[in-house]
Amino acid sequence: MKLSVIGCGYVGLVSGACLAALGNEVICVDIDKRKIALLKKQKMPIYEPGLEALVRENCRKRRLSFTSDLKSAVSGSDVIFIAVGTPPRPNGEADLSFIENVARTIAEEMDSFKIIVEKSTVPVETGEWIKKTVERYAKKSAKFEVASNPEFLREGTAVKDFMNPDRIILGVESKRAEEVLREIYRPLKAPVVATDIRSAEIIKHASNSFLATKISFINAISTICDAAKADVDQVALGVGLDKRIGPGFLNAGIGFGGFCFPKDLAAFIRISEKLGYNFELLKAVEKINQEQKQVFLKKIEQAIWNVSSKTIGVLGLSFKPNTDDMRFAPSLDILQALQAQGAKIKAFDPHAMPKAKALLKDVMFCKDSYSVCRGSDCLAILTEWEDFRKMDLKKVKSLLNQPVIVDGRNIYDPKEMRALGFRYFSMGRPS
Ligand code: UDX
C-alpha cells in the first residue's frame, strides 16, 4: 500500500520505518528541511535502538523515502498517518495547530480517496475536527475518511514495540477504513480492537494515565515503606504477582518524565474538565510525581547534611535509559534545585549529554561515570542505565570523597552496598 507519515519525530519516524518494513511503500514527511536532509543521508535525528538499520534497509529496498513536500506526499498516497507534535500549552491542553495545518494541506491537495489517520496523541473529538477541517478546505470533490490509530511506543524500545504490540487500536467510521487498516497491520498478528474514533482517542489517554497512576501509586507506597522500614521492591513483587494488577510499571523511583506521561496526563485532566468531570485521581498522580523529586532531594540532605558547596556526582540525565531524550526529565528539576542550594554538579550520561548541555548551566559534564565519582561528596543515580549497574564499585568507593550513594532508581542491593562499606540510600528500601 502507498502510505505517507506526516511528522518525523519519535512516533512518525519509527512508525514510517516499521510500516515500510511491513511491506508498504512509505513517504515520511517533515517541514524541517534539515531533518529531511539528514534522513536522506540515512543519518538519524534521534537515538533509537534498531532504527538506523531499519531505515537503511528499507531505503535500500526503495520502500521508504523522505521529503519536505507534503503536497506531493499527499497526492502519492492512499493512507496518510498524521504524527506531528501536539505540544502542551501553558494550561496543560494539547496544542493542535500542527494537526490543523496538516489537515488543511491534505484537504487542498486531495485528488482521490484518502484515509487520514491520527497517530499523534490527541484529545477526544480531534477526529471530528480533522473531518470538519478537511471538508471545509477541500478543493476537489475527492472522498475521504478519518480514523484513529494511537501508538503505544516507548522510547528506547520503540521499534520492538511497534513490531510486537500488545494490541492494535483502530478507531474507524466504516468497514472500508477498518479493512484497509487491518490489512496494513496484518503481518503483526496482534489482537485488534476496532471501535469508534472517540473511544480510540480515549483509549490512548486512559492507557497512559493508568500507567502513570501505577508509577505514582508505587512511589507513594515507597514513601510508606521508608517510614515503616519495609522494602518497596518486595512489596511491588508481592503485589504485582496478582494477575489482576501485573508486575509492570511498579518500579519506585524519582518519578516519571518524558514527553508522553506528563503532557498526556495534563491534557487528559483538561479534557475531563471540559467534559464536566473533575479528575481528582489524576491530579493526585501529578502531585505525587512532583513530590517524588523532593523526596529524593531530602534523601541527599539526609545523606550529606548541607548540600551547599558540596560536589554532587550525578549519573544519568535522560528521563529513562536507552534514550537521549531530556524532555521533562526529572534530572532537570533535581539538578536545578541542588544548584539553587549551592551544590556543585558533575554529571555523566551515556547518550543524553549533548541535549543536557543545552538545558543545564554550570554543570561539569564528565567523559565517563568514574570521572563523575572522582572528588564527589555524594553520588546520585538518576537514570538506571545498564552501564551503571555494572560499575566496579570498589573503584567507585576509592574515587569518591566519602562513600555515599543516593540511588533514585534502586539499581543496587542495599545489603551488598553495606557490605562494601557504602552509606547507601535508595527509594523505599531500608538503608
Ligand atoms: C510512554 C508509554 O509507555 C507509551 O506507551 C506511550 O506511547 C508513550 O509514553 P515512554 O515515555 O517512552 O512511553 O516511557 P516509559 O518506558 O513508559 O516510561 C515513562 C516514565 O516512567 C520514565 O520516566 C520512567 O523512568 C518512568 N517509570 C516507568 C517509572 O518510574 N517506574 C516504572 O515502573 C516504569
Image (cartoon, rainbow, N blue to C red):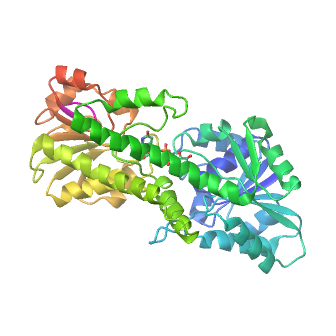
Q: Is residue 348 above or below residue 75?
A: above
Q: Is residue 357 above or below residue 386?
A: below
Picture quarter with the C terminus: top left
Residue 143 versus residue 222: which sits nearer the camera?
Answer: 222
Residue 310 versus residue 115: which sits nearer the camera?
Answer: 115
Residue 64 versus residue 313: which sits nearer the camera?
Answer: 313
Q: Magenta residues?
A: 424-431
Locate residue 233 relative to residue 96 in the image: left or right.
left
What's the residue at 61%, 53% (across, down)?
204
What's the residue at 49%, 66% (across, down)?
88
Which percent across, then down, holds residue 342?
A: 13, 57
Which percent across, then down, holds residue 58?
A: 72, 43
Q: Is residue 404 above or below residue 85?
A: above
Locate residue 218 relative to residue 164 in the image: left or right.
left
Which percent across, then down, holds residue 112?
A: 89, 66
Residue 173 versus residue 65: which sits nearer the camera?
Answer: 173
In magenta stretch: residue 51: no
